[in-house]
Image (cartoon, rainbow, N blue to C red):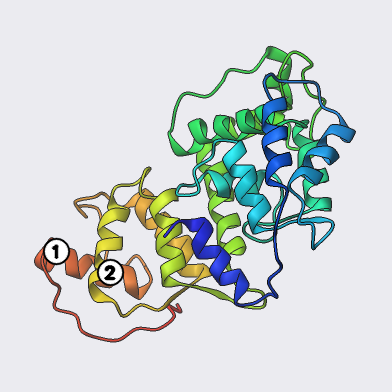
Amino acid sequence: MSIFSLLCCLRNSHHDSHSNGAAGGSAKSGAAKASAPEPYSDAHAKQLFATYQDPDTPGEIGPEGFEKLCTDLDISLEGALPLVLAWQLNGSEMAKFTEEEWVKGTSELRVSNLLTLSLAVRDLEDLLLLDKPPIQPPSSASVSAKKKSTAVSVPNPTEPYNKQRYYQYAASKDKAFSELYTFCFTLAKPPGGRNIDMDTANAFWSVLVVPRYPIMSDILAFISEKGTYKGVNKDLWNMTLEFCRTVQPDLSNYEADGAWPTMLDDFVSWKRASGPGPAAHTEEHDIEVV
């Protein structure tokens, strides 16, 4: 199941569903117009929002509109790019954007057509998910990227969108990835909840962490084989990334007194005891709380 499908199911269990007959024809029309980058325009950004807006819920792009948007951006719903898109446009719910979120996000990025929005998302895919060398900024942008202010700098008019945020991410890729990773936990968490279920966590870990840290594949195999871990709280979410960043795939530098969550200690015991075979642990676990 794709992340999009998984999260739509989650959200529909907490929210009333709408008949999202978002304008399929107009979406294709919008995609056709995105044949070349164009200067940012508030009016064009709002017009683009209207193309994917849920006709039954004015002021919101719902799941069907979001799916059409990703299709027109040539973004696969099976991978991490929908998460990057939500992150960059300040989405508070998976597969949804309010008009306020859209206007703020597109204004900060200075994007108002599909081609420039796709370019902005794919630049971050290259930087943070595929670990490609960063785009080098002009000298003036390089100075701006080093500023600690959170304000978005005036964009370089020679660039297709405002890359100041990108340059800040490029200056500290691990920090930027952590920001995306933390955002995804909040995005996946049910309204009013403190944890995400294990199926959701596994889907997110598969597309976010596995490509960067191969040891995550072994952790997922352990979770699947055990079948007893039911949910993930924020501490386990954060410590799992830290574990993948700091512990070698062969566990040679693992320290038992490192105060890791129980699930990760159990994973190490499982891997050391049986490698790819079955583990000896049989204890039931619910939400991991440290």
Q: Nearer the viewer, residue 34 or 133?
A: 34
**Residue found at the far right of this picture:** 43
Residue carrying label 1: 272
Quadrant of the image for the N terminus?
Answer: bottom left
Task: Indicate which disc, 2 or 1, sits on the residue closer to the N terminus.
Answer: 2
The secondary element bearing badge 2 is classed as: helix
Q: Quadrant of residue 265?
A: bottom left
**Residue found at the far front of this picture:** 25
- Residue kind at label 2, given as amino acid type: Ser
Q: Quadrant of residue 40?
A: top right
Q: Using the image, tell me which numbered label, if any, was put on residue 224.
A: 2
Quadrant of the image for the C terminus?
Answer: bottom left
* Left or right for 172, reference 89: left
Residue at the location (22% across, 71% down)?
225
- Residue kind at label 1, given as amino acid type: Arg
Give the tally of numbered discs: 2
